[in-house]
Amino acid sequence: MITRLAIEGYRSIRSLVVDLEPLTVVTGANGSGKSSLYRALRLLADCGEGRVIGSLAAVGGLDAVRWAGPERGTRGGQATEGTVRRGPVALRLGVATDGLGYAIDLGLPVAQCSAFDLDPEIKQEHVFAGADPRPAGVLVERRRGVVRVSTDGGWAELARGMHPWASVLDEYAGHAEAAELAGARRMLRGWRFHDALRTDPSAPARRPQVATRASRLDDDGANLAAALQTAIEAGWDRELERAIEDAFPGSRLQLPVVDGRMQVALQQPGMLRPLTAPELSDGTLQYLLLTAALLSAEKPQLIVLNEPERSLHADLVPALAERIRRAAEATQVVVVTHQTVLADALGGLRVELEKQGGETIVAGREGLLDQPSWHWPKR
Ligand SMILES: Nc1ncnc2c1ncn2[C@@H]1O[C@H](COP(=O)(O)OP(=O)(O)O)[C@@H](O)[C@H]1O
Ligand SMILES: [Mg+2]
């Protein structure tokens, strides 16, 4: 389970450390920084797939996403316009779990003749045990090109000359002397994000799908019927019946297979025939998609839902909250939402974000001393 998340220098987040619980609900007004936190988590997950540099380049490089305010923030009220930055530009992301933690420090490329100046550089990476990457808990350390592993007899050098665009998780996860790298990568790869589930008229979930087992729901929901059927065959049938009954009393879910293609259909009371996927309302489809994401046969380590209430009718919010709460018994869940009705129905740990002086902070925190501790390794 992720216990602590730390973000520095990303969009409206100058410096933020939050503790997470099995169910954490991130709320806040529009513009408070919820999506920034969500995207920071996605970037961390990208580190596990070896594509963090590409993801940052795709949005315009570090300059386009780095915190645009002053290094010290403006919360003290002092004038800041015209202030010059002194420290290096750094985007830092870190996550601690009850097992292995991972922290990455990205910076601007050192001036050189290359067509790829949008690519930031990886300055440091740390894999650690404990609540943050303080020196005592560091297991593997990558500083610029040099990778070192902590051993009983002190530090052992694993490699040198690493490229600044390559992640140590990608390059050395197979290394026998650094099993922690594989562990950290597995941890990051066990996260799942859902914010692009489609319910529009041409949504993939409305079309018949190849009938093949699907232990997880596709990002766009294209394999909805297969994911639900796989969950049923994995023993989650009662749970699914309950999900349908909570949301659409008296209705029955059907997953007919015709010519090797399957589709979602809902037999509702008073209807002479079941309504098929193209006929379902956006809200009904959204609920089925979220149910499939939360009930999938393969239970990920973390599910992150961004604004799951989108296109959902208010009547369905309690049923959705129940699905999320039940999923959180087996999988850690983070829900990002601006809807207080959903947040209230969910319970769990509430992290309310607000903007002060252009900077995202956790509401109610007086200053940095109120933040959980996090020691970024020095550059
Ligand atoms: N690089 C940046 N530096 C500082 N603030 C930024 C930067 N990029 C975006 N913002 C601001 O961050 C705020 C938070 O945006 P967002 O995370 O989308 O909020 P929410 O999802 O809570 O509505 C926006 O008001 C935006 O103006
Ligand atoms: Mg947002």
Image: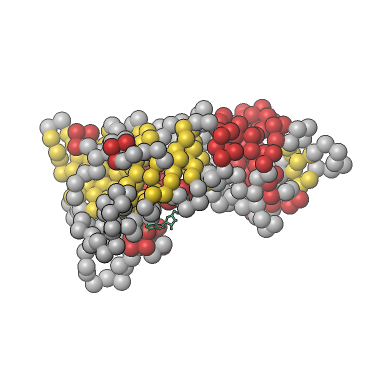
Counting from the top left corner in percent of width and height, residue 212 is at: 62, 44
Residues 215 and 29: in front is 29
Q: Is residue 107 visible from the viewing direction of this image?
A: no
**Residue occupying the point 80% across, 38% down:** 268
Q: Is residue 45 left or right of residue 141?
A: right
**Residue occupying the point 20% across, 56% down:** 87
Q: Is residue 5 left or right of residue 298?
A: left
Counting from the top left corner in percent of width and height, residue 191 is at: 45, 41
Q: In which quadrant will I find the N terminus?
A: top left
Q: Is residue 253 visible from the viewing direction of this image?
A: yes
- Tell me the quarter of the picture where residue 64 sits: bottom left
Residue located farthest toward the left when viewing the structure as drawn: 153
Q: Is residue 258 left or right of residue 214?
A: right
Counting from the top left corner in percent of width and height, residue 119 is at: 32, 62
- Tell me the quarter of the picture where residue 352 sits: top left
Counting from the top left corner in percent of width and height, residue 74 is at: 31, 52
**Residue occupying the point 51% across, 34% down:** 299
- Tell me the quarter of the picture where residue 214 sits: top right
Q: Is residue 220 left or right of residue 152?
A: right
**Residue occupying the point 83% across, 36% down:** 269
